[in-house]
Image: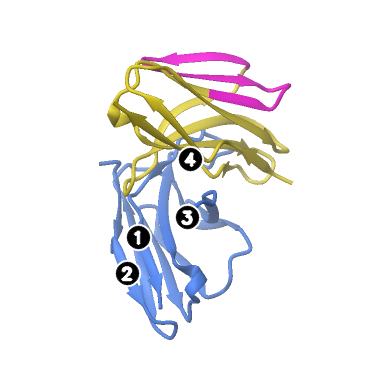
Amino acid sequence: GQNIDQPTEMTATEGAIVQINCTYQTSGFNGLFWYQQHAGEAPTFLSYNVLDGLEEKGRFSSFLSRSKGYSYLLLKELQMKDSASYLCASMIYNQGGKLIFGQGTELSVKP
Amino acid sequence: ETGVTQTPRHLVMGMTNKKSLKCEQHLGHNAMYWYKQSAKKPLELMFVYNFKEQTENNSVPSRFSPECPNSSHLFLHLHTLQPEDSALYLCASSQDDLRVTTGELFFGEGSRLTVL
């Protein structure tokens, strides 16, 4: 089966660093995505990892370990506007190509 | 503005009603998707269309009927729904089938459906 786990919610302080973990057990794995979704808005693409290692993009970085079925999203210098749901998604290749999503991590940034 | 527009944004319907959700993308993409988002649950893939042809039906009940008249428009026709079908229905598009492209999806803001 396909299974993706991430914490339901997290709280962090403005200006701090937070790491959101995601573990996956999926067959036909072909990459790991992170999306951000503010309340009442569309999910928007943050990052894509297909090879092991760290991808940095401004304040956001994403890490992947394929052997461990593990990824994390690192958010630095947190801002209040970073309060949102962060969705981890695994791309499955051998079933026609589709994204399987985790339930999302609701991040609250406090002053 | 993601380039994917969904209407209506909110819909309330009775179990015997027939209604439709509409999605339009202005990105020139070839693949379109319907996802269901329920509270505290993962996004669930419902249907995939690639070049107007349905390539995925994820065991969705027949009371949900998709239609893709062209690569820019996608509909979800609803009839005799159940209260448990109340959810946010998200439309998305990608440049090509996810077997071809890296898989960035562009989502609409969703249609919030309430079934009474």
> Chain A in the picture: what colour?
yellow
Q: Secondary structure at mark 1?
A: strand
Front label number (4 vs 1): 1
CB atoms of marks 3 and 2 within 8 Å: no
Q: Amino acid at mark 3?
A: Ala
| Residues tagged 4 and 2 counted as in contact (Cβ below 8 A) | no
Q: Which residues are magenta?
A: A52-72
Look at discs 4 and 2 and give the one toward the viewer: 2
How busy is the neighbourhood of tag 1: few (under 14 within 10 Å), some, or many (20 plus)? many
For disc 3, the marked residue is B39
| Label drawn at residue B96 | 4
Going from N to C along the chain, the mark reached first, 4 or 1, is: 4
The residue depicted at 60 percent of the width and 29 percent of the height is A31
Separation (CA) of disc 3 from disc 2: 17 Å
Q: Cα distance, mark 4 to mark 2?
A: 30 Å
Say which amino acid is labelled 2. Leu
Pointers 1 and 3 in contact (C-beta within 8 Å):
no
* Foreground disc of the pair 4, 3: 3
Is circle 4 on the same chain as circle 2?
yes
Residue at mark 4 to residue at mark 3: CA–CA distance: 29 Å
Residue picked out by circle 2: B11
The residue type indicated by label 1 comes to: Ser
* Label 3 or label 2, whichever comes before in sequence order: 2
